Amino acid sequence: ALAHLYVVRPMRRVGLAIDQLGRGDVENPVIVRGPADLRRLGGRLEWLRQRLIDEESARNRLLQHVSHELKTPLTAVREGAQLLAEGALAPDDERRVLEIVRSNTDKLAKRISDLLLLSELARGEMRLTREPLDLAELASEVLAQHALVARAGDVAFESDLHAAGVMGDRHRLVTVVDNLVTNALKVSP
């Protein structure tokens, strides 16, 4: 009977805690009493429970961020399409609205690409394609892609680029430079 109280009951508690965590139920703390080894095991299960809570919180923050990042350009596309459908815009205004729609569809495509990259990273499946590249050419291409947005925001690019050969993944390096330029455009006065 003493063994039942001292070992069997704590082992049953460990089993219940594992089942609870396996179902994703992280509400109740894991408390195991009994021999030191079982208490340590209970402590590790409580640590795991806390990690699961933290992971869920991080996932929720990411979903909120992604939702916001997708809604903003989608709203601009929807409103632009509505204006064009009404047919009441002057030709110059139509061109501006079309540019806004195009720019925002590019933003949506980029956000989706970023999500796919995050998914690859999370699964450990990200593959890099190494090829000889000139970083100056790559940076010039990215700056050219942002020229209209920069001009609309009254921002001018100044660059003093010199050939810089590297071996790298073109798509990933374009993403890095694009993120830097996009962020610079967002915070420029």
Image (cartoon, grey):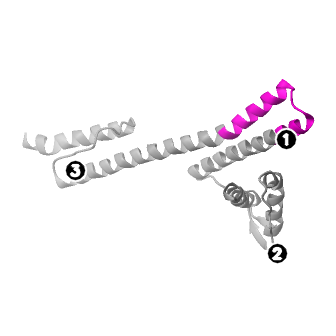
Instruction: Say which of marks 3 and 1 sits in front.
Output: 1
**Residue 31 within the magenta-colored segment of the rendering:** no
Secondary structure at badge 2 equals: loop
Mark 2 surroundings within 10 Å by alpha-carbon count, few (fewer than 14), some (14 through 19), many (20 or more) = few
Q: Where is residue 102 in the image (x, y as percent from the top left)?
A: 81, 41
Instruction: Please tell me whether residue 168 is drawn above or below residue 2 in the rendered image.
Output: below
Q: Which amino acid does label 1 sit on?
A: Arg
Kindly identify which residue carries mark 3.
38
Q: Is residue 31 left or right of residue 181?
A: left
Kindly check if marks 3 and 1 are in contact, taking CB atoms under 8 A apart as contact.
no
Instruction: Say which of marks 1 and 2 sits in front.
Output: 1
Q: Which residue lies furthest to the left in this view?
A: 1
Viewer-closest of 3 and 55 = 55
Residue 162 is tagged as 2
Magenta stretch, residue numbers: 72-99
Mark 3 surroundings within 10 Å by alpha-carbon count, few (fewer than 14), some (14 through 19), many (20 or more) = some
Marks 3/2: CA–CA distance? 64 Å
Q: In which quarter of the image is the N terminus?
A: top left
Kindly identify which residue carries mark 1.
96
Marks 3/1: CA–CA distance? 68 Å
Lower position in the chain sequence, tag 1 or tag 2:
1
Kindly check if marks 1 and 2 are in contact, taking CB atoms under 8 A apart as contact.
no
Lower position in the chain sequence, tag 3 or tag 2:
3
**Residue 88 within the magenta-colored segment of the rendering:** yes
Secondary structure at badge 1 equals: helix
Instruction: Say which of marks 3 and 2 sits in front.
Output: 2
User: Is the stretch drawn in magenta largely helix, strand or loop?
Assistant: helix
Marks 1/2: CA–CA distance? 34 Å
Instruction: Please tell me whether residue 156 is drawn above or below residue 125 in the rendered image.
Output: below
Q: What residue type is labelled 2?
A: His
Instruction: Please tell me whether residue 93 is drawn above or below residue 174 in the rendered image.
Output: above
